[in-house]
Amino acid sequence: MNTPRLVAAQPQSAHTSSTVSGGDFIQLRGVCKSYGEQLVVMDNLTLDMRADDRLVIIGPSGSGKSSLLRVLMGLEGIQGGTISFQGKPYIAGGKGCGKPLDESLRNQIGMVFQHYTLFPHLSVLGNLILAPTKVHGLSKAEATEKARAYLARLGLESKLHAYPSQLSGGQKQRVAIARALMLEPKLMLFDEVTSALDPEMVIEVQNVMMQLAEQKMAMIIVTHDMHFARHIATRVVFCANGKVVEQGPPEQIFTQPKEARTREFLEKVLHLD
Amino acid sequence: MNYQFDFHFLTGSFGALWDGLKVTLELALVSNLIGLVLGFGLCLMTLSRWFFIRWPAQLFIEFFRCTPALLQIVWFFYCVPMLFNVFIDPVAMGFLALGLNLAAFNSEAYRAGVQAVPREHLDASIALGLRSWQRTFYVVLPQALRSALPVLMTNGIGSLQQSALVAIVAVSDLMYVGKSLATEAYRPLETYTLIALIYFALSLPIAQLVQYIERRQEAAATR
């Protein structure tokens, strides 16, 4: 079958082969982060990820799931610990800002947010080509060609010249995914991207994420949708109080959680579903 | 009321009224130009992370916001020559007083626009790798200017009305001409009504345009 690729052909094998056993695509070591004295969102957090992993992070609100993504994206600093990305030091906590040490590494990470973040004054095309032309030095023609291709794969070709206000919520999130993919990231972060959507639009966004998964995009996903988590994850990570309580393949976590806290959490959320 | 309206006496004064109108338009246009440009600069200053850049701009804005425009005009007209020993033509003085006043108000309009840009858009533009000046110029300012536009235009209309205040320092604008005509002919009712209608006719289209823009922005936001 000739599935259109969302992920540009990238030398994935270069690091997959070397990291299959080690899991050093991303390594968090002793990461600490708190807001003020009271709210500790990462407490000596340690986590590994392989280049072919799709981590789904679940846990009660306030457990630092979104903070983890924001830190990896370089939006917020950490107070302690280190993070490496593709085997290179990426973020180091400390008295400084704890922001990314290496811009070129950060540029290999893409992120999609819970709230719509398409820039309303730019058309879909404008949103897609802004960073490629301004940051990555692509010509307007090259970037436009690329944007067309991505939109076509997402079935949004006709929306090339539309403005965000003319799109539905699901279309906006799909364009936001395309905008992140334009930069050919090696890792995609999804921060509750479907929680602001009407139920009937959730599926179209999840389908795009599944497409990415089939094409072996490394992803870290924060979601409250346990069904989707089970479907897309290679590994589910349950966090609470700034620590990883338990992690494992989705079948294990959802059917036979080892930790009492995981069980308790899952019983609560699955009941609500 | 058995007042006999008589607009005929005005026919001989169209030339004078036209000259006054030109001065008024000039005042409104130049003060808006100053207000838009300087206001923008002031806004950037107030958003600076450095206190010594923020502080003078804030002081300037508060001074012009918190004193009457009439007083500012009079002050410029009488005090600037005394303090600095310069004698500028009264119309230029009017440009300065009205323009600086408008700049203070416009700066606040710009600032409100900047602060209305959602935090998430900044996050997204960082995630896309845009540098800080690129975030400002490609993401923040275009959005801020859009949301500030109706307020800037309303302030613009305001400065057209306020320009009438310069009549007090003998700048021969529309108001001043009207005042002279009214006293010469003892026909204040007709003269001031006509003058009011002219100001009204100049402002109404802009006010309508503001409403149209606001409606369109609202429609876009709720979709």
Image: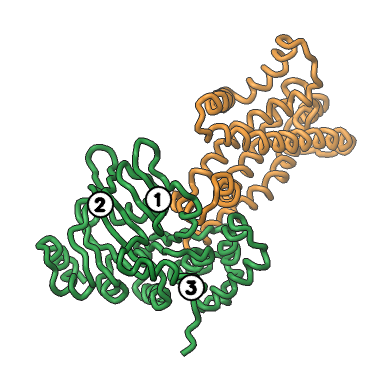
Tag 2 subunit: A
Q: Furthest residue to the front?
A: A18
Horizontal and vertical percent for residue B75? 67, 17
> Which labelled disc corresponds to residue A7?
3
B9 lies above or below A201: above
Q: Furthest residue to the left?
A: A260
Q: Residue at x 29, y 45 (%)?
A: A33
Q: Amino acid at mark 2?
A: Leu
Report the side of A260 relative to A5 (left or right). left
* First reached walking from the N terminus: tag 1 or tag 2: 2
Q: Residue at x 42, y 74 (%)?
A: A212
Q: Is residue A136 visible?
A: yes
Q: Nearer the viewer, residue A181 or B37?
A: A181
Identify residue for label 1.
A89
Q: Quadrant of the N terminus of chain B?
A: top right
Q: Quadrant of residue B33?
A: top right
Report the side of B87 relative to B99 (left or right). right
Q: Which chain is orange?
A: B
Q: Residue at x 74, y 41 (%)?
A: B198
Identify residue for label 2.
A45
> Callout 1: helix, strand or loop?
strand
Per the model, the C-alpha gap separating discs 3 and 2 is: 30 Å
Q: Residue at x 47, y 61 (%)?
A: B222
Q: Nearer the viewer, mark 1 or mark 3?
A: 1
Horizontal and vertical percent for residue B166? 72, 25
Report the side of B130 relative to B24 (left or right). left
Horizontal and vertical percent for residue B122? 48, 50
Per the model, the C-alpha gap separating discs 1 and 2 is: 16 Å
Tag 1 subunit: A
- Pointer 1 local density, CA inside 10 Å: few below 14, some 14–19, many at least 20: some
Q: Which chain is green?
A: A
Q: Amino acid at mark 3?
A: Val
